[in-house]
């Protein structure tokens, strides 16, 4: 069933969520409430980020997280804010987070949903006042209602997502999400404390001329990728790379382009996390007409084995992703 585009630009997020829910006569409103909980947590994180330089919450905590990365203070703050909002909201029974080792049991054992989050994406950019984000995926639990969440609830493949989205804390703050019927973007109006529909029915361009990759690792890239990159240069494409995946993805979604985080000779599965980063963005890419693969297969069809597993990521305009894949295959 296709979503009827009943909402127009300027519609408040709450009203939009309500309108969508009314199109499904049997919807109980739990997913709607969960989306509101996420939107609320994002408002709180937005506030923390905006005053980070003044509140003494820039910088690292001095230890590594479960990913082996230097954890930033705001990584932890964002993680706590989200966990609290989702636990109090009552619609989520379990959460997995980039920052935490195992499953977070919210205690809401009668809730239907589980959530995977990257609470703060691009956190190393905080200290230099460059945009950061939050990425989330929502799944229906597999285990029986009334019990604690299980590993199987969390290790679902991306095709099982019932909703996914991101928040971008940039020159303005935006919430972009999909429940499987297209992608809509909302801009936050801080003086009113409300998100308004600003980007209805977002569509990824079929082709583009922006490529986003950290080319510092060039010498370690697969030969096929080097070959694709040289064609980008021959055509004088624009190289754009923020180092905050959400921001790089968002720009390419609006303008047409490809984002690549490849396997390297040292890191065969690249850096990005399948469950916290790639699945959500792959879902949004496909919902907007784009494409997302690991260079060979669809991201959404990868069967995850570990919460923190990584995957190479090729996402964006379908013509560009296909072309990059052809180069990879040529050098197999
Ligand atoms: P996170 O801050 O959630 O750990 O994610 C960082 C990711 C992603 O946002 C970004 O695209 C990528 O790391 C940048 O990695 P490089 O510095 O290796 O380019
Ligand atoms: Mn991190
Ligand atoms: Mn991230
Ligand atoms: Mn993160």
Image (cartoon, rainbow, N blue to C red):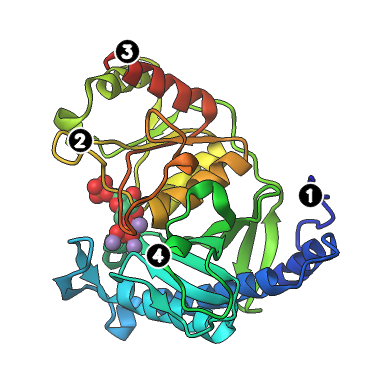
Closer-to-camera residue (217/126): 217
Disc 4 CB within 8 Å of nearest ligand 4 atom:
no
Of labels 3 and 4, earlier in sequence is 4
Which residue bears the numbered disc 4? Answer: 151
Question: Label 4 neighbourhood size at 10 Å, few (<14), some (14-19), many (20+)?
Answer: some
Q: Which mark is residue 330?
A: 3
- Under circle 1, the secondary element is loop
Vertical comparison of 182 with 225: above or below: below
Which residue bears the numbered disc 2? Answer: 264
Question: Label 3 neighbourhood size at 10 Å, few (<14), some (14-19), many (20+)?
Answer: few
Task: Tell me the CA gap for discs 1 and 3.
Answer: 40 Å
Q: Residue at x 20, y 35 (%)?
A: 264
Closer-to-camera residue (11/262): 262
Of labels 3 and 2, earlier in sequence is 2
Of circles 1 and 4, the one toward us is 4
Of labels 4 and 2, earlier in sequence is 4
Vertical comparison of 55 with 239: above or below: below
Vertical comparison of 199 with 100: above or below: above
Residue 202 in the image: x percent, y percent?
65, 45
Q: Is residue 140 left or right of residue 301?
A: right
Which residue bears the numbered disc 1? Answer: 3
Image quadrant in which you'd find residue 66: bottom left
Question: Label 2 neighbourhood size at 10 Å, few (<14), some (14-19), many (20+)?
Answer: some
Q: Residue at x 57, y 42 (%)?
A: 254
Of circles 4 and 2, the one toward us is 4
Q: Residue at x 46, y 73 (%)?
A: 149
Quarter of the image where the C terminus is located: top left
Of labels 1 and 4, earlier in sequence is 1
Disc 3 CB within 8 Å of nearest ligand 1 atom:
no
């Amino acid at each position: 069933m296709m979503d009827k585009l009943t909402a127009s630009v300027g519609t408040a997020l709450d009203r939009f969520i309500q309108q969508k829910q009314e199109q499904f006569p049997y919807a109980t409103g739990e997913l709607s409430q969960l989306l509101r909980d996420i939107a609320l947590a994002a408002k709180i994180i937005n506030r923390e980020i905006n005053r980070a330089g003044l509140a003494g919450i820039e910088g690292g905590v001095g230890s590594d997280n479960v990913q082996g990365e230097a954890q930033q203070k705001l990584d932890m703050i964002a993680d706590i804010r989200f966990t609290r909002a989702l636990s109090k909201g009552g619609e989520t029974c379990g959460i997995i987070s980039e920052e935490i080792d195992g499953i977070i049991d919210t205690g809401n054992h009668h809730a239907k949903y589980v959530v995977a989050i990257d609470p703060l994406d691009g956190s190393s950019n905080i200290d230099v006042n460059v945009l950061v984000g939050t990425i989330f995926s929502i799944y229906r639990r597999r285990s029986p209602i009334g019990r604690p969440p299980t590993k199987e609830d969390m290790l679902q493949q991306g095709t099982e997502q019932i909703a996914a989205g991101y928040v971008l804390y940039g020159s303005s703050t935006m919430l972009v999400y999909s429940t499987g019927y297209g992608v809509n973007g909302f801009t936050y109006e801080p003086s009113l404390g409300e998100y308004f529909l600003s980007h209805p029915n977002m569509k990824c361009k079929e082709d583009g001329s922006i490529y986003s990759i950290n080319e510092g690792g060039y010498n370690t890239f697969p030969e096929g990728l080097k070959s694709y990159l040289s064609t980008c240069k021959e055509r004088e494409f624009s190289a754009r790379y923020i180092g905050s995946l959400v921001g790089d993805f968002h720009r390419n979604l609006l303008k047409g382009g490809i984002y690549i985080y490849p396997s390297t000779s040292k890191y065969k599965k690249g850096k990005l996390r399948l469950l916290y980063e790639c699945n959500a963005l792959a879902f949004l890419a496909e919902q907007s007409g784009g494409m997302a693969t690991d260079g060979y297969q669809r991201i959404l069809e990868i069967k995850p084995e570990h919460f923190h597993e990584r995957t190479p990521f090729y996402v964006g305009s379908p013509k560009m992703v296909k072309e990059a894949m052809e180069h990879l295959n040529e050098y197999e």
